[in-house]
Amino acid sequence: DYGGFNLKAARIAKLKGFYTQFYIAPKVWAWNKGRIEDIKKWIDQLYVIFPFEEKMFQEKGISTHYVGNPLQDSVLKFNENKAKSLDLPVPFVALLPGSRKQEIKSAIPVFKQLVDENPQINFVIAGVSEWSDLIKQTGLKYILDDTYQVLSQAKAAVVTSGTATLETALLNIPQIVVYKTDWLFYSLAKLLVKIKYISLVNIILDREAVPELIQTSFSSEHIGLKLTPLLTEDNPKREAQLSD
Protein backbone atom coordinates (compact mmCIF):
# COMPACT_ATOMS: atom_id res chain seq x y z
CA ASP A 1 0.00 0.00 0.00
CA TYR A 2 2.71 2.47 -1.02
CA GLY A 3 2.06 3.65 -4.55
CA GLY A 4 5.12 5.88 -4.81
CA PHE A 5 7.45 2.90 -4.43
CA ASN A 6 5.34 0.09 -5.84
CA LEU A 7 4.48 1.79 -9.13
CA LYS A 8 8.22 2.21 -9.77
CA ALA A 9 8.74 -1.45 -8.92
CA ALA A 10 5.87 -2.41 -11.24
CA ARG A 11 7.46 -0.43 -14.08
CA ILE A 12 10.78 -2.24 -13.63
CA ALA A 13 9.03 -5.61 -13.47
CA LYS A 14 6.87 -4.93 -16.52
CA LEU A 15 9.85 -3.80 -18.59
CA LYS A 16 11.57 -7.07 -17.63
CA GLY A 17 8.59 -9.02 -18.97
CA PHE A 18 6.85 -9.89 -15.72
CA TYR A 19 3.06 -10.17 -15.39
CA THR A 20 2.19 -7.50 -12.77
CA GLN A 21 -0.56 -7.65 -10.18
CA PHE A 22 -1.03 -4.76 -7.79
CA TYR A 23 -2.83 -5.09 -4.44
CA ILE A 24 -4.38 -1.97 -2.84
CA ALA A 25 -4.60 0.68 -5.50
CA PRO A 26 -3.08 4.14 -5.00
CA LYS A 27 -5.77 6.56 -3.80
CA VAL A 28 -5.88 8.47 -7.06
CA TRP A 29 -9.49 9.44 -6.33
CA ALA A 30 -8.14 11.71 -3.61
CA TRP A 31 -5.11 13.20 -5.32
CA ASN A 32 -2.64 12.83 -8.21
CA LYS A 33 -4.98 11.31 -10.80
CA GLY A 34 -2.06 11.44 -13.23
CA ARG A 35 -0.94 8.12 -11.75
CA ILE A 36 -3.88 6.41 -13.48
CA GLU A 37 -1.91 6.42 -16.72
CA ASP A 38 1.06 4.81 -14.97
CA ILE A 39 -1.23 2.13 -13.53
CA LYS A 40 -2.72 1.46 -16.95
CA LYS A 41 0.74 1.19 -18.47
CA TRP A 42 2.50 -0.99 -15.90
CA ILE A 43 -0.22 -3.04 -14.17
CA ASP A 44 -1.93 -6.09 -15.67
CA GLN A 45 -4.36 -6.76 -12.80
CA LEU A 46 -5.40 -4.26 -10.13
CA TYR A 47 -7.00 -5.26 -6.81
CA VAL A 48 -8.93 -2.61 -4.86
CA ILE A 49 -10.32 -2.40 -1.32
CA PHE A 50 -13.09 0.18 -1.80
CA PRO A 51 -16.16 -0.70 -3.89
CA PHE A 52 -16.30 2.60 -5.79
CA GLU A 53 -12.72 2.11 -7.03
CA GLU A 54 -13.61 -0.87 -9.20
CA LYS A 55 -15.85 1.10 -11.56
CA MET A 56 -13.54 4.11 -11.62
CA PHE A 57 -10.49 2.12 -12.74
CA GLN A 58 -12.45 -0.12 -15.10
CA GLU A 59 -13.75 2.98 -16.89
CA LYS A 60 -10.10 3.87 -17.54
CA GLY A 61 -9.55 0.51 -19.23
CA ILE A 62 -7.73 -1.12 -16.30
CA SER A 63 -8.55 -4.73 -15.38
CA THR A 64 -9.77 -4.19 -11.80
CA HIS A 65 -11.14 -6.48 -9.10
CA TYR A 66 -12.81 -5.45 -5.81
CA VAL A 67 -11.60 -7.92 -3.16
CA GLY A 68 -12.99 -6.36 0.02
CA ASN A 69 -11.19 -4.46 2.75
CA PRO A 70 -8.69 -6.07 5.16
CA LEU A 71 -10.20 -4.03 7.99
CA GLN A 72 -13.38 -6.06 7.61
CA ASP A 73 -11.36 -9.22 8.29
CA SER A 74 -9.81 -7.63 11.39
CA VAL A 75 -13.18 -6.56 12.78
CA LEU A 76 -14.79 -9.94 12.08
CA LYS A 77 -11.91 -11.70 13.82
CA PHE A 78 -12.26 -9.37 16.80
CA ASN A 79 -16.04 -9.90 17.03
CA GLU A 80 -15.47 -13.67 17.13
CA ASN A 81 -13.06 -13.40 20.07
CA LYS A 82 -14.07 -10.34 22.10
CA ALA A 83 -14.26 -12.06 25.46
CA LYS A 84 -12.24 -9.47 27.39
CA SER A 85 -14.09 -6.90 29.49
CA LEU A 86 -12.36 -3.63 30.32
CA ASP A 87 -12.78 -1.70 33.56
CA LEU A 88 -14.61 1.24 32.02
CA PRO A 89 -17.39 3.56 33.18
CA VAL A 90 -20.67 2.77 31.41
CA PRO A 91 -21.92 4.42 29.33
CA PHE A 92 -18.90 6.28 27.93
CA VAL A 93 -17.65 8.07 24.83
CA ALA A 94 -14.42 6.87 23.21
CA LEU A 95 -11.93 9.55 22.17
CA LEU A 96 -9.47 8.58 19.42
CA PRO A 97 -6.76 11.24 19.02
CA GLY A 98 -4.99 9.47 16.13
CA SER A 99 -1.70 7.64 15.80
CA ARG A 100 0.61 10.43 14.60
CA LYS A 101 2.27 12.84 17.01
CA GLN A 102 0.96 16.01 15.35
CA GLU A 103 -2.60 14.65 15.25
CA ILE A 104 -2.48 13.82 18.94
CA LYS A 105 -1.00 17.20 19.90
CA SER A 106 -3.82 18.92 18.01
CA ALA A 107 -6.59 16.73 19.39
CA ILE A 108 -5.64 16.45 23.07
CA PRO A 109 -6.36 20.10 24.11
CA VAL A 110 -9.79 19.96 22.49
CA PHE A 111 -10.55 16.61 24.09
CA LYS A 112 -9.44 17.94 27.48
CA GLN A 113 -11.77 20.92 27.14
CA LEU A 114 -14.60 18.65 26.00
CA VAL A 115 -14.21 16.51 29.13
CA ASP A 116 -14.00 19.55 31.42
CA GLU A 117 -17.14 21.10 29.94
CA ASN A 118 -19.21 17.90 30.06
CA PRO A 119 -18.78 16.37 33.53
CA GLN A 120 -22.06 14.45 33.07
CA ILE A 121 -20.46 12.32 30.33
CA ASN A 122 -17.79 9.66 30.81
CA PHE A 123 -14.91 9.82 28.33
CA VAL A 124 -12.10 7.35 27.67
CA ILE A 125 -9.13 7.92 25.35
CA ALA A 126 -8.18 4.99 23.13
CA GLY A 127 -4.52 5.61 22.39
CA VAL A 128 -1.30 3.95 21.26
CA SER A 129 1.63 3.30 23.60
CA GLU A 130 4.05 5.00 21.20
CA TRP A 131 2.64 8.36 22.34
CA SER A 132 1.64 7.39 25.88
CA ASP A 133 3.51 10.36 27.40
CA LEU A 134 1.31 12.83 25.53
CA ILE A 135 -1.84 10.98 26.56
CA LYS A 136 -0.89 10.51 30.21
CA GLN A 137 -0.20 14.23 30.60
CA THR A 138 -3.90 14.98 30.05
CA GLY A 139 -4.96 13.40 33.31
CA LEU A 140 -7.88 11.78 31.47
CA LYS A 141 -8.84 8.11 31.65
CA TYR A 142 -7.17 6.15 28.88
CA ILE A 143 -6.58 2.65 27.51
CA LEU A 144 -3.55 1.94 25.32
CA ASP A 145 -3.25 -0.47 22.38
CA ASP A 146 -6.76 -1.89 22.77
CA THR A 147 -8.79 0.34 20.48
CA TYR A 148 -11.27 -2.29 19.29
CA GLN A 149 -12.14 -3.25 22.88
CA VAL A 150 -12.69 0.38 23.85
CA LEU A 151 -14.74 1.16 20.74
CA SER A 152 -16.88 -1.96 21.00
CA GLN A 153 -18.00 -0.98 24.51
CA ALA A 154 -18.53 2.73 23.78
CA LYS A 155 -21.86 4.45 23.33
CA ALA A 156 -20.33 6.75 20.71
CA ALA A 157 -16.90 7.95 19.59
CA VAL A 158 -15.03 11.07 18.56
CA VAL A 159 -12.51 9.89 15.98
CA THR A 160 -9.56 11.59 14.33
CA SER A 161 -9.88 11.16 10.58
CA GLY A 162 -8.07 8.11 9.22
CA THR A 163 -8.45 4.35 9.14
CA ALA A 164 -10.11 4.43 12.57
CA THR A 165 -13.24 6.05 11.13
CA LEU A 166 -13.90 2.95 9.04
CA GLU A 167 -13.05 0.63 11.92
CA THR A 168 -15.50 2.50 14.16
CA ALA A 169 -18.24 2.16 11.54
CA LEU A 170 -17.54 -1.56 11.06
CA LEU A 171 -17.90 -1.99 14.83
CA ASN A 172 -21.29 -0.26 14.51
CA ILE A 173 -20.49 2.66 16.83
CA PRO A 174 -21.91 6.15 16.07
CA GLN A 175 -19.14 8.69 15.62
CA ILE A 176 -18.06 12.24 15.00
CA VAL A 177 -15.00 12.62 12.78
CA VAL A 178 -12.53 15.39 13.62
CA TYR A 179 -9.30 16.71 12.20
CA LYS A 180 -7.01 19.68 12.75
CA THR A 181 -3.57 20.36 11.34
CA ASP A 182 -1.19 23.22 10.63
CA TRP A 183 -2.98 25.98 8.68
CA LEU A 184 -0.36 26.11 5.92
CA PHE A 185 -0.35 22.34 5.47
CA TYR A 186 -4.16 22.30 5.36
CA SER A 187 -4.24 25.10 2.77
CA LEU A 188 -1.78 23.22 0.55
CA ALA A 189 -3.66 19.95 1.02
CA LYS A 190 -6.90 21.56 -0.12
CA LEU A 191 -5.21 22.45 -3.39
CA LEU A 192 -4.06 18.86 -3.96
CA VAL A 193 -6.82 16.73 -2.47
CA LYS A 194 -9.99 16.72 -4.55
CA ILE A 195 -12.60 14.96 -2.44
CA LYS A 196 -15.77 16.19 -0.74
CA TYR A 197 -15.21 14.39 2.56
CA ILE A 198 -12.31 13.39 4.79
CA SER A 199 -13.74 10.31 6.52
CA LEU A 200 -13.71 6.93 4.79
CA VAL A 201 -17.31 6.35 5.86
CA ASN A 202 -18.56 9.39 3.96
CA ILE A 203 -16.19 8.83 1.03
CA ILE A 204 -17.49 5.29 0.53
CA LEU A 205 -21.16 6.30 0.84
CA ASP A 206 -20.57 9.56 -1.10
CA ARG A 207 -22.65 11.54 1.39
CA GLU A 208 -22.35 12.85 4.93
CA ALA A 209 -23.42 9.89 7.03
CA VAL A 210 -21.16 10.95 9.92
CA PRO A 211 -20.47 14.57 10.98
CA GLU A 212 -17.06 15.99 10.08
CA LEU A 213 -15.52 18.79 12.16
CA ILE A 214 -12.42 20.14 10.45
CA GLN A 215 -9.91 22.82 11.51
CA THR A 216 -11.74 25.63 13.42
CA SER A 217 -14.93 23.53 13.53
CA PHE A 218 -13.00 20.97 15.60
CA SER A 219 -13.91 22.48 18.97
CA SER A 220 -15.42 21.20 22.22
CA GLU A 221 -18.54 23.28 21.59
CA HIS A 222 -19.20 21.81 18.15
CA ILE A 223 -18.43 18.28 19.33
CA GLY A 224 -20.84 18.68 22.23
CA LEU A 225 -23.67 19.74 19.92
CA LYS A 226 -23.11 16.82 17.56
CA LEU A 227 -22.55 14.32 20.37
CA THR A 228 -25.75 14.81 22.37
CA PRO A 229 -28.13 13.14 19.86
CA LEU A 230 -25.73 10.20 19.43
CA LEU A 231 -25.96 9.36 23.13
CA THR A 232 -29.74 9.07 23.20
CA GLU A 233 -31.38 5.78 22.31
CA ASP A 234 -33.93 6.01 19.49
CA ASN A 235 -32.75 9.50 18.57
CA PRO A 236 -33.26 9.88 14.77
CA LYS A 237 -29.65 11.03 14.23
CA ARG A 238 -28.24 8.08 16.16
CA GLU A 239 -30.54 5.65 14.37
CA ALA A 240 -29.64 7.15 10.98
CA GLN A 241 -25.92 6.65 11.63
CA LEU A 242 -26.41 3.08 12.76
CA SER A 243 -28.50 2.39 9.67
CA ASP A 244 -25.85 3.90 7.38
Image: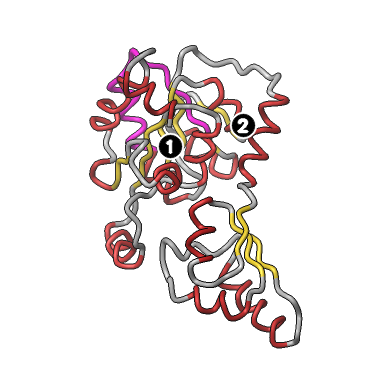
Of the numbered discs in the image, which one, if any, rests on residue 120? none
Q: Position of residue 153 (x, y in %)?
A: 54, 20
Horizontal side, residue 18 vs residue 65: left or right:
right
Residue 115 in the magenta stretch? The answer is: yes
Which residue occupies the foreground of this view, 212 or 95? Answer: 212
Total numbered circles? 2
Which residue is depicted at the point 27% across and 36% down?
219
Q: Nearer the viewer, mark 1 or mark 2?
A: 1
Q: Earlier in the sequence, mark 1 or mark 2?
A: 2
**Relative height, residue 74 to residue 193 (above, below):** above
Which residue is depicted at the point 45% across and 39% down?
97
Q: CA distance from mark 1 to mark 2?
A: 15 Å
Of the residues shown, which amino acid type is indicated by label 2?
Asp
Mark 1 — residue? 159
| Placement of the C terminus among the 4 image quadrants | top left
Mark 2 — residue? 146
